[in-house]
Amino acid sequence: MTSNQRVAYTRYMNWDKDAIFKALSDPTRRLILDELSERNEVTLYELTVRLIMKHNLAISRQAIAKHLSVLEDAELVTSEKKGKYRVIIFNNEPLKNLLKGWVE
Amino acid sequence: MTSNQRVAYTRYMNWDKDAIFKALSDPTRRLILDELSERNEVTLYELTVRLIMKHNLAISRQAIAKHLSVLEDAELVTSEKKGKYRVIIFNNEPLKNLLKGWVE
DNA sequence: TCTTCATGCAACCATAAGGTTACTTATACT
DNA sequence: AGTATAAGTAACCTTATGGTTGCATGAAGA
């Protein structure tokens, strides 16, 4: 993607607000976004370990995978298979202008 | 409330993010916020009429009242009884800084 | 190749959420 | 006072949601 294209993408893309707000409504998913916003890429395995150990979350890998698919539907997360691993990337584009009309 | 108190309130209040994101997750509630952000005060009756007529929503007054109580839990809405009517007021304070950490 | 490790997928379960209907209460108008 | 109007309350129904368990798949290392 060129710089120009990214500008267009950023400015004119129309996101699915339903999907975005739904994705944000769950505290575990917000925690996942917090984790992702702190690093570039994280594998599902790594993320699972972090959530369970660092954040004392009692949750299974499968449950986290489900949350990720909800986040992917909202395009807040991108994922890519790298060998054995699934690498997850945070995308905050959909969050820009999300509250426009209510705030500012 | 004095001007100084409002500053403190605005800057240091810690909102219940769970309640806020939950409140925002439903499209009908977001439509209600849209309506409210366009006027200062609206009665429940008036709001019901607007949602049904102007927005072609098939919904009962009771359902709307339920949505309002969710919005009140998130403190996105304040209400006040004025005689026969319930007057509803929008409060966007909880929305400020809501996405901080993810955007900007 | 054989095993291990990270993931994918499907069925199932309990509870939360959005909605309705029906009835009560309370203010306002005649 | 009597009636109409706006709102409050509660029981109930259906579906969405977050979670689990169990098993299949596919890449890596010994």
Image (tube, coloured by chain):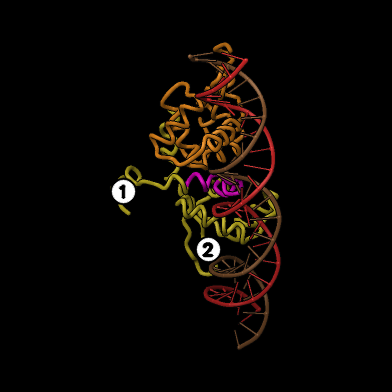
Chain colours: A yellow, B orange, C brown, D red
Dot 1, crowdedness within 10 Å: few (<14), some or many (≥20)?
few
Residue type at mark 2 is Arg
**Residue A60 belongs to magenta span:** no
Query: What range is drawn magenta here?
Result: A20-33
Locate residue B34 relative to residue A13 in the image: left or right. Answer: right
Distance from label 1 to label 2 (Cα)? Answer: 27 Å
Q: What kind of residue is marked 1?
A: Ser
Q: Which residue is mark 1?
A: A3
Q: Which quadrant of the view contains residue B56?
A: top left
Tell me where residue D23 appears, x and y as whole percent. Answer: 64, 76
Which of the two residues, B11 or B36, is positioned nearer the viewer here?
B36
| Residue B88 in view (yes/no) | no
Which image quarter holds the N terminus of chain A? Answer: bottom left
Image: A15 above or below B91 = below
Does residue A77 appear left or right of residue A31 in this picture?
left
In this rendering, does residue A26 appear at all? Answer: yes
Tell me which corner region of the image, top left, top right, bottom left or bottom right, holds residue D9.
top right
Residue B103: x %, y % from top left = 47, 39
